[in-house]
Amino acid sequence: MVDTYHVFDAEVLRHVDFKPVAGLDQVLIPGDPGRKTRIQRTQNGIPLPDDTRAAIVNTAREVGVSEGSIQRATA
């Protein structure tokens, strides 16, 4: 009997190690885009449209969050 997991792992590695055509620097596998996005957002924060950011800041002011705290959070 063939070890299906071993065959699958070898096949996945074959695709991951594949050298893409000129102009592309990598071959993505399922989960790669999400991992990349998570790393970027952990380092840089979650991008928000200006109107959403303004609404959050205005709400913070309305509920009494100090300007110093707002400035630190939006820096």
Image (spheres, rainbow, N blue to C red):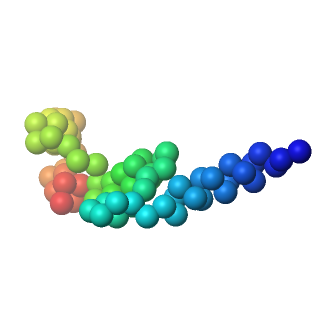
Which residue sits at x=82%, y=49%? 3
Quadrant where the N terminus lies? top right
Which residue sits at x=34%, y=60%? 21
Vertical placement of residue 64 versus 15, above or below: above
Q: Position of residue 65 (x, y in %)?
A: 22, 45
Query: Which of the pair 37/66 is nearer the observer?
Result: 37
Residue furthest out toward the front: 21
Q: Position of residue 16 (x, y in %)?
A: 52, 58
Which residue sits at x=77%, y=45%? 4
Vertical placement of residue 51 versus 27, above or below: above
Q: Is residue 23 left or right of residue 52?
A: right
Vertical placement of residue 29 versus 25, above or below: above
Q: Position of residue 22 (x, y in %)?
A: 30, 64
Residue furthest out toward the right: 1
Which residue sits at x=48%, y=50%? 29
Vertical placement of residue 73 versus 19, above or below: above
Q: Position of residue 75 (x, y in %)?
A: 18, 60
Q: Is residue 36 left or right of residue 17?
A: left
Q: How many marks?
A: 0
| Residue 38 appears in the figure | no
Query: Which of the pair 45/37 is nearer the observer?
Result: 37
| Residue 41 appears in the figure | yes
Query: Which of the pair 55/5 is nearer the observer?
Result: 5
